[in-house]
Amino acid sequence: MQLKKCVVVITCAAATAAALGFAMPAHAQKRPSANAASDDVFLALRDAARADDSATAMNLAARLPDYVIPSYVDYYRLKPRVRDFTAPVSEIRDFLTRYDGSAIADRLRNDWLLALGKTGDWTTFDEQYPLFVLNDDVQVKCFALNSRALKGQNVADEARALLTSPKDYGQGCSDLIGTLAQNHQFGESDLWAQIRQAVEAGNTTVARRAAIFTDNGDVSLQQVIDKPALMLARGPGQGRTAHELYIIAIGRAAKGNPQQAASFLGSASGLTAQEQAIAWAQIALPASMKLMPEAIDYWRKTKDAPLSYESYQWKARIALRAGDWKMVRATIDAMPGSLRNDITWTYWLARALKEDGQAEAAQRLFQSIASNVSFYGQLATEDLGQKIVIPSGPVPPTPAEIAPMAQNTGFKRALKFYDLNMRYEGIREWNWELRKMNDRQLLAAAEFARQSDVLDRMVNTSDRTRLEMDFTQRFPAPHLTEMSANTRPLGLENAWVYGLIRQESRFIKNAKSYVGASGLMQLMPSTAKYVAKKIGLTEFTQDQINDINTNLLLGTSYLNMVLNNLDGSQALATAAYNAGPGRPRTWRSTLSRPVEGAIFAESIPFNETRGYVKNVMSNATYYAALFENKPQSLKQRLGTVAPRTNTPTDLP
């Protein structure tokens, strides 16, 4: 079973060129419409804008003079020309004025800020940046710091805090690194840290651009990236640049064979103690991703070396697997503040303090996060000696409170987008309207979502309340009769299955991931076919996969197979449902000792699966509390995961 990634509804529709009379990009020719209905034209317009086909977008927009969502017609007409820098400033300003305060105006301002940053129009950029409401684009933030740095302001510390995830950089962040290097706000250590981090993350373009500002590093970096073995064979050489390139070569080699890279580093001479520690980190990270037993020893050799965000987290995870609580605490203490304050590391720091006998300090940290309605909030609650319970629900929203939600123009646009299977746009519109709502308004909006049969928005909206929490909104159980008819014969727990569906599809009946998983339980076609054959569903065809009864039958049957195949462990079976049953078997085989389920979950090497397991198990605990009306234990549900030899399985 493949990793399913984020769930979306894929119906990227477009009218045919013959029907519309325009040449559409090949990827957009997916939904012919002989009548060229306005919705089809609109969907084709959206696809043309996505393809940056400005000529087609202009022509299609002209066919929609009275469309029900005029702001998006205008946006799609304008967006490609903003991106290729041909849109008149007057037209952009007119759009922003006309649709001021709307989600799509903020989206266009985001697009324009990127274009302004790329062209270096800092006067207009500085005027527009404070008006960017969401301010959720890392590259725009980089351009903003770059503008300030070019004016002589010292932004080095802000840049270090921002530049932690090279996959999000783009031109804006590369330009920022260059500016800070040229005006000496970034020294050699900063530059090489960014280069190592970019290579580590696989963004070699960013690494090469940063290397231009080092002492001839740009000349040799690509050679080291492509052929690290040649550099390792020559040894570290002399000087800072040579040593840094050697460290990068060590990291590149370690991705394929950490043990071989360790052998090279162990015999290398001439590196300073700090350089050696940094080099060991380049080996420890890929070894950790492979859950190799040597990883803990590699991390110990990194001592107090500065690490990337990813490396800090994996050093702590491997220390957890090894039971080295002193290393857990030291690693979390060394993390940058923004990372150290994440609830994950607040929890594990509290555990480390508790293991060290500092009960009062641990208690304070547990108390600081126990009210958080999440995996680690639940664990902290149990560490305080309490069980997981459902708080008393609020007074339900009244018809008078719900009525304004039905009249909300943003929600109306969102529902129209859902009808068109444009969920990304619908979610953007819906969430924009939630930004300034209080708890009562959020509960009313969630109830309106329930009445509109968009349960994913109900869950998301209700999740935002802080004081008045309605867990029946947050954890709905639609199709309970059909669910029980499938789970009861298998002896499968409804709470766990609902916890999984809440994470998989958010109850979107026709949800489909980009790799092809479908329906409430997000079944892959190959898995559905396998299960149908195993349970004797001889007349099954792939077009039945979104049928609720069929999806639940096949999904629960497969989940039960996985659970039985993994010793009845819900934690392992949840991981298997997301990543395939072979992977959790491999992950548990690398354990040197039994570990609590929370440690196993936190040290899963796939980011998606790690978050998935924690969310599903947290969801299931709340569902059980709702269904059984009694306190629950997440720790008991997670159980203990013990080492076991990896054995083959025929499950997909």
Image (cartoon, rainbow, N blue to C red):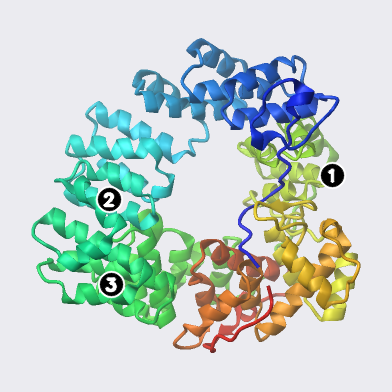
Q: Amino acid at mark 3?
A: Ala
Q: Is residue 421 left or right of residue 590?
A: right
- Cα distance between the residues tagged 1 and 2: 57 Å
Q: Position of residue 277 (x, y in %)?
A: 22, 68
Q: Please identify the quarter of the rendering in which residue 393 is found.
A: bottom right
Q: Answer above or below: position of 443 versus 29.
A: below
Q: Quadrant of the N terminus?
A: bottom right
- Cα distance between the residues tagged 3 and 2: 19 Å
Disc 3 crowd rating (10 Å Cα; few below 14, some 14-19, many 20+) is: many
In the foreground, 481 or 403: 481
Mark sitting earlier along the chain (1/3): 3
Mark sitting earlier along the chain (3/2): 2
Residue beneath label 2, please? 222
Q: Position of residue 594 (x, y in %)?
A: 50, 87
- Cα distance between the residues tagged 1 and 3: 59 Å
Q: Amino acid at mark 1?
A: Gln
Q: Which mark is residue 261?
A: 3
Task: Mark 1 vs mark 2: give the one in front.
Answer: 2
Residue beneath label 1, please? 451
Q: Position of residue 593 (x, y in %)?
A: 46, 88
Q: Answer above or below: position of 232 versus 224.
A: below
Task: Mark 3 vs mark 2: give the one in front.
Answer: 2
Q: Position of residue 299 (x, y in %)?
A: 30, 73
